[in-house]
């Protein structure tokens, strides 16, 4: 049972929502709960898609509770970063689609977790940023790597150098978020999109996610090798046969999973 997260499942969509008023600032207990909750959602056969969100209206998350860092020594910082990187690796290895539902303020580690999601929805009133430079720090939840891949090296460097906040529209313009909607429709839009994904064949979704997530960091031919492996494996599945039969027979497919 998580004390600082609201973990629920609705129509095969799992929600992991931060719930530590007033601003969803991460301390040790809350930080440790996130990878644990994600692991549970990924292991639950009733969950087909996972969404990261917030139970608070005004804030998605302001990232780390800086009071945690005040007396932290080198060993403590290594431990903090290790937990963060464990979460990043779990997110990257996820066989299930990961979505983000952002409203209010998403900065620091709060935004970093969003960057590792597949599709990012934001309220039109959201504000997003990585202000770590202003405390002489860097983002430690994989943002240096995710931003370079999302924005390209020059934009990623400038974003982290500046440390400022972007509006939802500005974030959409540079590729930090994918969909901008009115605040009152964020949850509805994300849930609807997630339910649509949940109706698709899970094995094919996992294959797409693996090819893109792993392949983007590899030489082209090595990425092709992953694509070949996944294509051959999918070709032997009942869902592929069902998909072919449904298409040729002009009927809706009935997936095995």
Image (tube, rainbow, N blue to C red):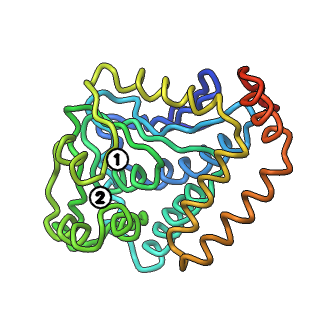
Question: For this rendering, which residue is in front, 8 or 195?
Answer: 195
Residue on which the image places disc 1: 25
- Seen in the picture, residue 220 relative to 117 is either above or below; the reply is below
- Seen in the picture, residue 196 relative to 122 is either above or below; the reply is above
Give the secondary structure at mark 1.
strand
- Seen in the picture, residue 47 relative to 29 is either above or below; the reply is above
Using the rendered view, name the quadrant where residue 101 is placed: top left
Question: For this rendering, which residue is in front, 243 or 218?
Answer: 243
Residue occupying image coordinates x 53% and y 44%? 98
Using the rendered view, name the quadrant where residue 54 is placed: top left
* Inter-mark Cα distance, 2 to 1: 8 Å
Q: Residue 106: horizontal and vertical position, in percent?
A: 29, 45
Determine whether label 2 and label 1 are within 8 Å by CB.
Answer: yes
- Seen in the picture, residue 163 relative to 46 is either above or below; the reply is below
Question: For this rendering, which residue is in front, 200 or 90?
Answer: 200
State left or right for residue 160 relative to residue 63: left
Residue occupying image coordinates x 49% and y 29%? 193
State left or right for residue 181 relative to residue 19: left
Residue occupying image coordinates x 28% and y 36%? 59
Q: Residue 203: horizontal and vertical position, in percent?
A: 73, 45
Image quarter in which the C terminus is found: top right
Q: Residue 12: horizontal and vertical position, in percent?
A: 64, 27
Question: For this rendering, which residue is in front, 129 or 220?
Answer: 220
Residue on which the image places disc 2: 66
């Amino acid at each position: 049972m998580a004390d600082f997260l609201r973990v629920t499942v609705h129509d095969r969509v799992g929600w992991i929502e931060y719930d530590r008023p007033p601003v969803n600032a991460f301390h040790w207990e809350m930080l440790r709960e996130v990878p644990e909750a994600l692991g549970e959602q990924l292991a639950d056969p009733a969950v087909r898609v996972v969404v990261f969100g917030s139970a608070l209206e005004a804030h998605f998350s302001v990232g780390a509770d800086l009071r945690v860092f005040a007396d932290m020594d080198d060993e403590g910082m290594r431990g903090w970063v290790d937990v963060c990187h464990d979460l990043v690796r779990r997110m990257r290895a996820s066989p299930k689609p990961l979505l983000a539902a952002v409203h209010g303020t998403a900065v620091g580690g709060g935004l970093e977790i969003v960057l590792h999601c597949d599709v990012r929805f934001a309220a039109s009133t959201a504000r997003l940023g990585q202000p770590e430079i202003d405390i002489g720090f860097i983002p430690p939840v994989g943002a240096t790597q995710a931003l370079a891949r999302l924005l390209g090296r020059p934009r990623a460097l400038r974003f982290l150098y500046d440390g400022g906040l972007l509006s939802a529209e500005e974030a959409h313009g540079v590729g930090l978020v994918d969909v901008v909607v009115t605040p009152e429709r964020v949850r509805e839009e994300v849930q609807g999109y997630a339910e649509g994904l949940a109706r698709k064949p899970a094995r094919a979704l996992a294959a797409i996610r693996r090819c893109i997530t792993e392949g983007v960091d590899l030489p082209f031919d090595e990425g092709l090798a992953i694509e070949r492996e996944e294509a051959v494996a999918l070709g032997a599945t009942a869902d592929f046969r069902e998909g072919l039969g449904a298409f040729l027979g002009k009927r809706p497919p009935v997936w095995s999973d």
